[in-house]
Amino acid sequence: MKQVAVIGGGSWGTALAIMAARAGHGIQLWSRNPEVVESINLNRLNPAYLTDVRIPDAVRATSDLADAVNGAELVILAAPSHATRACLKVASSLQPAMILVSATKGIEIETGKRISELVAEVVPDAVRPRFVCLSGPSFAKEVVENHPTAIVAASDDREAGRIVQSELSFDNLRIYTNDDVIGTELGGSVKNVMAIAAGMVAGLGFGNNSVAAVITRGLAEITRLALRAGRASGNSGGSGGNG
């Protein structure tokens, strides 16, 4: 059993808190909404997200960010990308022994920076935890309803990725590992562009051939973008996925 902090009481943060609790961990869930905090602690329900799913007793909600992180071994960032920089103000509460897990699927709008770049910029070296990007095709509601789901934990630190895989995988949630942080962050962000494009194609009345063409070419473009970003950062790219 580990102590896990989840920063963000939205649908994905709530789902990850539920899954981590089901896996046997103690959870401290931070939300800036006092109504969400009160409802989780008193009624075991999030009144704003996944409203019909009971939240396990192992989840304790708080509106104090430093309190949520205190004593945590895994700190899961599940706030929107535009709020991540502000959430990282808890840097003084972070410790190198922790693992910081980014479950944020997005890029900071103002700077175009990925979450790993934000962490490197905002969190001082002396207290910076090991970084893992958690991403993949997943709907929060389906995860908590026990639909089989596969996502990835990407990290330059193989041990950190393995720990996240081991501690957060549970029954229907299977986590794979790789070392391609840049590719995983970009893929988790720009895939939404292709999802919108696919929806537009379907909305125009075109069939599966057209949707498949958009998705296939989109994957090629995402790959080229990730490779170019990797070269720009001095990283030649990840070595692929592991079990």
Image: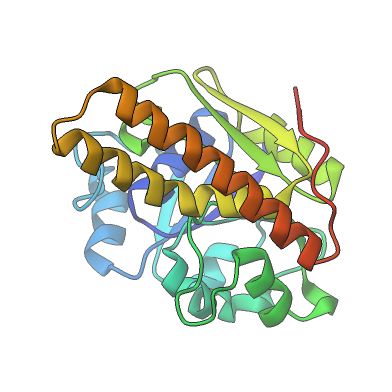
Q: Count all numbered tags in the image, as a single digit.
A: 0
Q: Position of residue 238 (x, y in %)?
A: 80, 44
Horizontal side of residue 144 vs 136, given as left or right: left
Horizontal side of residue 168 vs 172, given as left or right: right
Residue at 23% over, 53% down:
39
Residue at 50% over, 56% down:
104
Q: Position of residue 88 (x, y in %)?
A: 58, 75
In this view of the protein, can residue 186 be seen by the observer?
yes
Residue at 75% over, 38% down:
178
Q: Quadrant of the C terminus?
A: top right
Q: Which residue is nearer to you in this view: 25 or 31?
A: 31
- Judging from the image, the colouring scheme is rainbow
Q: Which residue is nearer to you in this view: 239 or 155?
A: 239
Image height of 10 relative to 125, above or below: above
The quarter of the picture where residue 203 lies is: top left
Q: Position of residue 127 (x, y in %)?
A: 79, 74
Q: Position of residue 1 (x, y in %)?
A: 67, 36
Residue at 22% over, 43% down:
200
The quarter of the picture where residue 113 lies is: bottom right
Image height of 23 relative to 34, above or below: above
Q: Which residue is nearer to you in this view: 67 or 232?
A: 232
In this view of the protein, can residue 58 be seen by the observer?
no
